[in-house]
């Protein structure tokens, strides 16, 4: 399920801060971000896009071209995220 709004960032230990130019997408605060073709994106695409971290703030580049805006994200830390399809066996997994 795609994110539809900003999420409160609940973290035990916020990590290193990085910034990348954004793809032509809207990235919401507190959601997972990935790297695709050198751009920051919100698209998981398992096996294709690389997990980058957790978005620090919203970055709306949905009306622009790839690279028009940059998004900041944490690369390390422990975060509480919302999601679906989890089971008890998922607790503690990276």
Image (cartoon, rainbow, N blue to C red):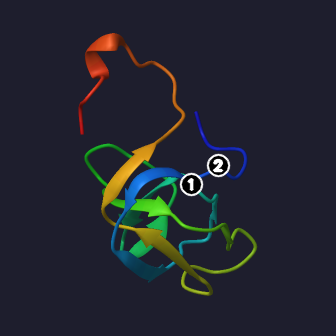
- Mark 1 lies on a secondary structure that is loop
Residue 30 numbered mark, or none? 1
Q: Position of residue 46 (x, y in %)?
A: 32, 43
Crowd tier of the residue under label 1, counting other residues whose Cα lies within 10 Å: few below 14, some 14–19, many 20 or above: many
Expressed as whole percent of the image width and height from the top left, the position of residue 7 reads 65, 49
Q: Residue at x 37, y 66 (%)?
A: 35
CA gap between label 1 and label 2 equals 5 Å
Please tell me how crowded label 2 is: few (under 14), some (14-19), or many (20+) other residues with Cα within 10 Å. some
Q: Which residue shows up at 30% across the image and 62% down it?
A: 76
Give residue 68's quadrant in the image.
bottom right
Where residue 93 appears, as percent x and y from the top left, is: 23, 32
Q: Dot 2 corresponds to which residue?
A: 7
Q: Are marks 1 and 2 in contact (CB under 8 Å)?
A: yes
The answer to whether 54 is drawn above or below residue 20 in the figure is above
Residue 30 vertical placement versus 66 (above, below) = above
Q: Secondary structure at mark 2?
A: loop
Q: Quadrant of the C terminus?
A: top left
Q: Is residue 76 left or right of residue 74?
A: left
Query: Residue at left 55%, top 67%?
Result: 56
């Amino acid at each position: 399920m795609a994110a539809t709004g900003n999420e409160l960032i609940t973290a035990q230990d916020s990590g290193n801060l990085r910034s990348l130019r954004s793809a032509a997408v809207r990235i919401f605060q507190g959601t997972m971000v990935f790297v695709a073709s050198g751009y920051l994106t919100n698209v998981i695409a398992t096996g294709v896009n690389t997990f980058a971290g957790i978005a620090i703030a919203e970055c709306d580049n949905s009306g622009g071209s790839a690279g028009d805006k940059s998004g900041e994200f944490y690369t390390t830390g422990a975060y509480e995220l919302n999601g679906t399809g989890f089971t008890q066996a998922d607790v503690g997994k990276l």
